[in-house]
Image (cartoon, rainbow, N blue to C red):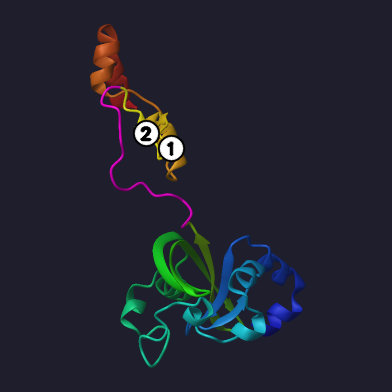
Amino acid sequence: MRKLLQNDAFFKVLFDVIPVLSLIVNIDGRVYSVNHAAKNLLGVTDEAVYLQKGGDVLHCIHTKDDPNGCGFGQACKSCVVRNTAMEAISGSSTHRTKGQFEALLGDTIKQLNLLVSAAPFEYQGNKFAILILEDISLITELEGLLPICASCKSIRDDKGYWNRLEKYIQEHSEADFTHSFCPDCIKKLYPDYYDKIVQYLVEE
């Protein structure tokens, strides 16, 4: 695998242009290579990470939980990165599995919200997985109490402005909207056509 990464310029370019943190790991969870995005974010080189465990490369705070290191601690059982990698090694592609990951970045422990994708591949009879980690920690998740108007259903943001419900949710989540009418509103707005519209919607 190392020879492929060193000698196949096309493969290396494809791997390096992935715009988010990406790793190639083997069946033991050991890292063979990281792309440019990973090198920039983690401050590492291919030589420094070669054959290290994934948790060590990603600065996981749980790598020291067990004397055997990454993959053996209690937290490793539910690790989204490890589990997604192992699923890929066993032959299953995984797309954007959401999970949390705790890493020591600089002097600070940070809880990252990740979307992890993985795909398996074989090279010279050995199994590998390419892991892609998207950090979505900066995307605000909807939680807690939201001030909502009892009449028009607008939501007040943290700056005191009132926004339409759809706009607020689109700006604070990954959701998008499509519009329709519920049966109660059809009955109120189009009473003469209620039966026909409802029948049409049921058949559709």
Which residue occupies 40% across, 34% down?
160
Do the numbered discs 2 and 1 sit on residues whose CB atoms are within 8 Å?
A: no
Q: The C terminus lies in which quarter of the figure?
A: top left
Q: Residue at x 30, y 35 (%)?
A: 147
Percent from the top left, x then y, of residue 37? Answer: 63, 66
Secondary structure under tag 2 reads strand
Vertical arrangement, residue 204 with respect to residue 22, above or below: above
The residue to which callout 2 is attached is: 156
x and y, in percent, of residue 81 in the image: 44, 71
Q: Nearer the viewer, residue 154 or 74?
A: 154
The quadrant of the rendering that contains the N terminus is: bottom right
In the image, residue 183 sits, relative to residue 194, either above or below, namely below
Which residue in the protein does label 1 denote? 159
Q: Is residue 143 magenta?
A: yes
In magenta segment, residue 65:
no
**Amino acid at pointer 2:** Arg
Q: Is residue 190 visible?
A: yes
Quadrant hosting residue 176: top left
Residue 131 at what x, y percent from top left? 53, 69
Query: As displayed, is residue 204 above or below residue 95?
Result: above
Residue visible at 69% across and 80% down in the picture: 4
Mark 2 or 1, closer to the camera: 1
Give the magenta-colored segment's residue range: 137-151
Q: Please state the horizontal and vertical placement of residue 44, each as a whole percent of the image.
A: 63, 78
Label disc, if present, on residue 194 of the rendered structure:
none
In the current view of this chain or complex, which residue is farthest to the bottom? Answer: 67
Q: Nearer the viewer, residue 25 or 152?
A: 152
Amino acid identity at mark 1: Lys
Q: Main secondary structure of the magenta part?
A: loop
The local secondary structure at tag 1 comes to loop
Horizontal side, residue 186 vs residue 9: left or right = left
